[in-house]
Image (spheres, rainbow, N blue to C red):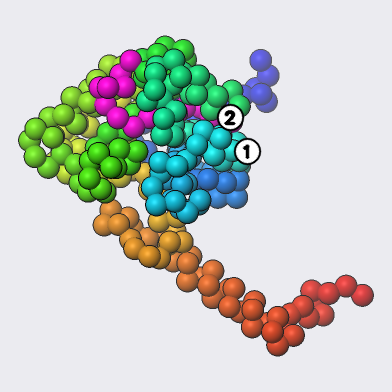
Amino acid sequence: MSSQNKSSRKTILDIKKMKELGEKITVLTAYDYAISSILDECGIDMILVGDSLGMVVLGYDTTLPVTMEDMLHHTKSVSRGAPNSLIIADMPFLSYQVSPELALTNAGRFLQEAGAQAVKMEGGKEYAEAVHKITSAGIPVMAHVGLTPQSIHQIGGFKVQGKKEDAALRIIEDARIMEDAGAFSIVLELVPEKLASEITKSLSIPTIGIGAGIHCDGQVLVVNDMLGLFDKFTPKHVKKYANLNQEIKKAVKNYISDVKISSFPDAEHSFK
């Protein structure tokens, strides 16, 4: 094979090696070509096409209305913009809960149709059979325990999970079962820092934290949150690295003003 055909895209083996070497793993969400291109150029390790697009892109109150077609559409866009990052597609609500067979079919669509290299699935031991079936077919799976937004009505809202001992033990058990089922990494969302540290030390696969403290092997944030595009509220676990909401508003207001007073387009932006 010609070396020119060799891809520079990160693989799950690269990600696992980073844990072994103690190198932190960086993950951000993206939902379109433009943002994924920027993240990829900056050297992000993994891009998650999150079903969070339901809330930050499509305007729903939860992730539950997001469909397979929504996710496939956005994953295709992201994959075209990011040739170097490992792209993970979120399995939306009811795309894998119904049966392991349906889970495998839908997971395969993300690789075959949308250009993803892996899928992410929320939940613990109840989905071990589905994870095993998918990974046995050669499709990498990122697991996700702790706060699982697709179960938001069952767990009673967006709140920290695993504070009590019995709840913490369930999360530890779920994480170990997901590793045994074949997951290559696992997201720990909104769990106490000490619990996340314990899980991270006990697993051979990387942990990716979101609201889970500093001891995870990597971190993930919703890109709209960390860029300050959404200004209604900022979750405790989010650090804003920019305030694009205000920058965009300033630009739009300047544009409106320029058009109203006929200072745009000027000679520089017109043709003779």
Q: Is residue 160 left or right of residue 259?
A: left
Q: Secondary structure at mark 2?
A: loop
| Up-down relation of residue 264 to residue 56 (above or below) | below
The image shows residue 100 at horizontal and vertical percentages of 40, 17
Closer-to-camera residue (53/217): 53
| Up-down relation of residue 3 to residue 263 (above or below) | above
Q: Is residue 217 magenta?
A: no
| Distance of label 1 from label 2 (alpha carbons) | 8 Å
| Residue identified by numbered label 1 | 80
Query: Looking at the image, do the residues carrying marks 1 and 2 touch, with CB atoms under 8 Å apart?
Result: yes
| Residue identified by numbered label 2 | 115
Image quarter where the N terminus lies is top right
| Residue shown at the point (68%, 19%) measured from the top left | 2
Q: Is residue 113 left or right of residue 183?
A: right
> Residue 192: which quarter of the image?
top left
- How many neighbours does mark 1 have within 10 angstroms: few (below 14), some (14-19), or many (20 or more)? some
Q: Is residue 220 visible?
A: yes
Three-letter amino acid code at the position of disc 2: Gly
Disc number placed over residue 100 in the picture, else none: none
| Residue shown at the point (33%, 58%) measured from the top left | 239
Magenta residues (range): 114-129
| Residue shown at the point (74%, 80%) measured from the top left | 264
The earlier-in-sequence mark between 1 and 2 is 1
Three-letter amino acid code at the position of disc 1: Arg
| Up-down relation of residue 208 to residue 224 (above or below) | above
Closer-to-camera residue (186/168): 168
| Up-down relation of residue 194 to residue 6 (above or below) | below
